[in-house]
Amino acid sequence: MTRLPIPEVVVAVAGVGLLLAPFMLGNYWIRVLTTMFMFAALASATNIMAGYTGYPAFGNVVFFGLGAYATGLAMTKLRAPFWLGVVLAAVVCCLYAVVIGFPVLRLRGHYFAIATLGMNEATRALVENVAFTGGGMGLSLPVQRGEVDALNRHFYFVMLGLVAAAVGATYCVTRTRLGYGCLAIRFDEDAAGSCGVPTTRFKVLAWTLSAVLTGMAGAAYANWVGYIEPRAVFDMNIAVKMFVMMLLGGAATVFGPLLGACLVELVGLMAWSQILNYHSAALGVIVIAVVIFVPGGLMSLRRGLSIRLLLDNVRASRL
Amino acid sequence: MPAPRKVLEGHNVGKTFGGAVALTSLDFHLVHGEVLGLIGPNGAGKTTLINIVSGYLRASSGTVTLRDRVISSLPAHEIARAGIARTFQTVRPFMGMTVEENVLVGAFFGAARRTDDRHPRQRVDDALAFLSLTSRRDDPVNALTIADRKRVELARALAMEPQVLLLDELMAGLNASEIDQTIALVRDINRLGVSLIIVEHVMEAVVGLCQRIIVLHHGQKIADGPARMVLDDGRVIDAYLGSRYRDRVRGLEGKP
């Protein structure tokens, strides 16, 4: 069983390819890739909290909606430029995560997951019922000036930048005390505390990092599509997708969520065009297969794939 | 001769869970460099006391001080950084990590951060070498035997460079030869200058290691003194040891 080498050369070539791609591809493919990047950034942000720290923040999509609305309101009411809108989204999500984090992160496991779901629903209901946000009617963002191709490339690079930020943040987490502390919390929170890991602070830190990245993706999305409404940006389907991608690629790995996002989007795309009515079912089947045969995600296969490994996993899943 | 220096001290420490009393106003202390045994029947409050000292539980009353610093109001991680490390009754290494990563967590976050200028990696190497785990450093912990997992827990605690180490039934589940090795190991740890409190049912370990023993029964201290005296105490024998034990120990020691 040989370990596949992933030399820096491959990464560099891929990087250059991604930078040149929008100048060579048509608008359709640019949009596909932009969506893929957005989900890669979201899955990666989720991974910091749910993967490394082990806290199933199902409601993390709340930060996506919050970021989208923070930007939308700043740009429509305050006439803020795009970049300032993104910064504001990050600040709002950061504050929200810290303020909500200290009480909510006392909960563990399923209780925490349910609490974050409630958080998302409550925030959505609030946004839906306040006149200031446009309520259920939604919010139209200022129209971006420029030709279509340039705008497409603009958002392509914004989302690509977010992916880079998310990967960079994840990489930093894995190389620092924060990462070891978070993993220790995931495996045994009490033992982690007894080893001197400041558990509450680290959980809030990890969640804040996750929230800021998610919020920035929401901000970019709002500008990209130009119109947001509560049901679209506080959407649990996005939350589910973020989790599926993370688990499919490999939780608690740097590149797993990216791999998961690419696969889910590509499969979705092909299934969408081939079997319009069954594409959700196709995705579901893949997810079930992965959870049963490769519970560690696709990244766990980089040391090699064998029938025996798959069977061992099935046995371990106690089906 | 100067009075022995108390490294850890508890005053009037009590704990109730709802209506159930686990510990009743307990006074105790640990002398620097000492191995203190904490024995008593199941449910006597031994683990509760360990949990209070390590910050896993908050005492209902009383204070615990570490070198005159009150620690009983601190969260667990600050108590750990103040210099108290522990192992768990049911062995609890970080199961998804390798041996080395486990120990690294201790080295990164433990007390040594402030008192020692060795690099954390160096502390990991030293702790692994001390527990003869160097060759297994890259092994995942879930591939190890219970005895080895206990050593990982010990290495993780040692990498924290603690002043006080709390061992909660370290010998439980080990076979006879493993117990002998572990007793020697604990003695070596004590020689490093670490003061220890050990909760133990394996009397061989208690007799072999402890200079002093506290006996708990129904949350109350019924004996506290030099090991020999406590183990001969009639009340201790009645409450916990049983007369068969006394006869066996006398037999072991070759006395009538």
Image (cartoon, coloured by chain):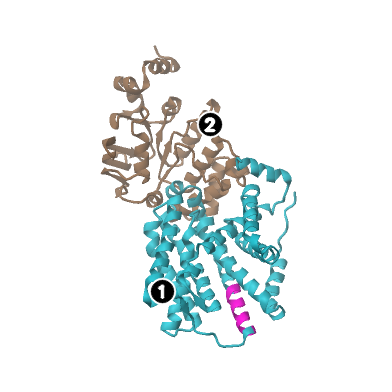
Residue in view at x 60 percent, y 81 percent: A154
Q: Are marks 1 and 2 on the same chain?
A: no
Tell me the residue that label 1 is attached to: A135
B21 to A158, vertically: above or below: above
- Find residue B207 and report its image quarter: top left
Q: Position of residue A204 (x, y in %)?
A: 43, 60
In-front residue for pair A2/A31: A31
Question: Which residue reaches farthest bottom?
Answer: A146
Q: Position of residue A124 (x, y in %)?
A: 42, 67
User: Along the horizontal axis of the image, is A94 left or right of A20?
Assistant: left
Q: Position of residue B13 (x, y in %)?
A: 27, 40
Dot 1, how many residues are within 10 Å of its Cα: few (below 14), some (14-19), or many (20+)? some
Question: Which residue reaches farthest front?
Answer: A277
Colour applied to chain B: brown
- Find residue A278 and report its image quarter: bottom right
- Find residue A250 and report its image quarter: bottom right
Q: Secondary structure at mark 1?
A: helix
Residue in view at x 29 percent, y 37 percent: B28
Colour applied to chain A: cyan
What's the magenta bit mostly, secondary-structure-wise? helix
Question: Which residue reaches farthest right?
Answer: A2
Q: Which residues are magenta?
A: A149-160
* Dot 1 amino acid type: Gly
* Dot 2 amino acid type: Gln
In-front residue for pair A211/A64: A64
In-front residue for pair B148/B5: B148
User: Along the horizontal axis of the image, is A24 left or right of A238?
Assistant: right
Q: Please, which chain is the residue tagged with disc 1 on?
A: A
Tell me the residue that label 2 is attached to: B181
